Amino acid sequence: MKLLNALQLDRVITRKATIVRLAAGAASIGLFIAAAYFGLLAWAERPGELDGSVRYEVQVGQPFAQVTAELHQQGVIQSPRLFSLYARLTALDVAVQAGEYDLPQRVSPVGLLTLFATGQVVLHSVQLPEGAKLSQVLKALRTNAFLVDDLGIGFVNGDLDTLLRRLRLSVPFAEGYFFPDTYLVVKGTKVSDVLIMAHEAMMTKLKTAWQQKSALVQLATPAELLILASIIEKESGRESDRRTISQVFHNRLQRNMRLQTDPTVIYALGDGYDGDIRSRDLRMDSPFNTYKVKGLPPTAIALPSLDSLLAAAQPSSGDYLYFVARGDGTSQFSRTLGEHNAAVRKFLLQGTKLN
């Protein structure tokens, strides 16, 4: 074995000492990095100092640095640098979804980023009321602060034929073909998207009602069922009367009798209706004047509810041909004209109008 001289031995010892020092330094750095990392994790889990809930909106395409700065300005986060560092390390800075957020009180940084990444945005209620006319619905939707009116500046709410073309809907008419319900949407939703949701819902409900129609129903198409359902919707003051009202209308249609229903006349009058129907209104020339025209009007007159759709499809069995409002939300039904006239005299004396 060759012996090392003193100089060589010194060099070996020096190299080994250097390696030991480097290893110790690397270990120290590793321990420091690990401590910093776990410290950052602990910081991210720490509850914030926000005293109350805050609504914050992330804009489409908004840089994460700007989001961080705004959150700091509003007191949601205390350290923008640590917040940005944690977001980068977890790749949550590129997962933020645009929208409105309700930030909970004392939300932690990790809770905040999770909220943004999962898109738990605020949902706003948009209501299409039962029995409303489509022009009324359009006016309400187009002036809703949370919706974007994409129907065009020149679009008139009553121009329903144009509406069908713009929405590309293949139905015989627009009125009534949108299901009345409460729809939850995010801020910035287009009016057309709400209408399409409501239309798809109505098509589903109408299909169900048509498939469940009874043998008493002699209507030719689902569109006719929709028209009748819209009349029932406007005529019924109480849900329990709807199937009997439906019976009256089905019996009159099968006997080739005029429906003689006020809501169709009111629909024909449009903005000219002032709360009263006069004798001249019953004589006007209009396909919606069911006091002059036999059969159903050419379109629906309102947005019918599911109850009215099912009532139109499943009328109660019987031979009623007339009804008059009692004044308490219910109706008095009659089989003969004599019975009906007696009911009219009785309830009109109480100020109730004839249907």
Image (cartoon, rainbow, N blue to C red):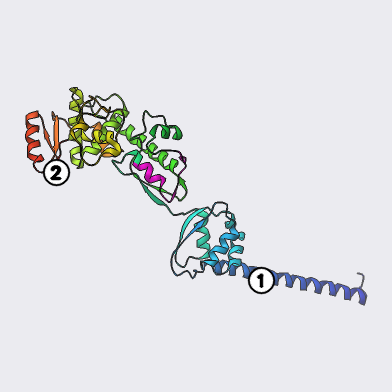
Q: Is residue 218 left or right of residue 66?
A: left
Residue type at mark 1: give it: Phe
Residue 148 is inside the magenta segment: yes
Residue where numbered disc 1 is placed: 32
Specify the segment rendered in magenta: 136-154
Front residue of 289/230: it is 289
On screen, residue 350 above or below 162: below
Dividing the picture into quadrants, the one containing residue 44 is bottom right
Which residue is located at x 58 percent, y 66 percent? 80
Circle 2 packing at 10 Å, graded few (<14), some (14-19), many (20+), is some
* 233 left or right, relative to 179: left
Q: Nearer the viewer, residue 68 or 21?
A: 68
Q: Is residue 224 magenta?
A: no
Label 1: element kind: helix
Could you tell which of marks 2 and 1 lies nearer the N-terminus? 1
Q: Which mark is residue 188?
A: none
* Residue 173: percent from left, percent from top: 36, 30
**Residue neighbourhood size for the residue with mark 1, other residues' Cα within 10 Å, grouped as few (<14), some (14–19), many (≥20):** few
Report how far apart the C-alphas of labels 2 and 1 lie in the structure: 83 Å
Marker disc for residue 327: 2
In the picture, measured across the screen, residue 130 lies left or right of residue 164, that is left
Residue 187 drawn at (x, y percent)? 45, 51
Q: Amino acid at mark 2?
A: Gly
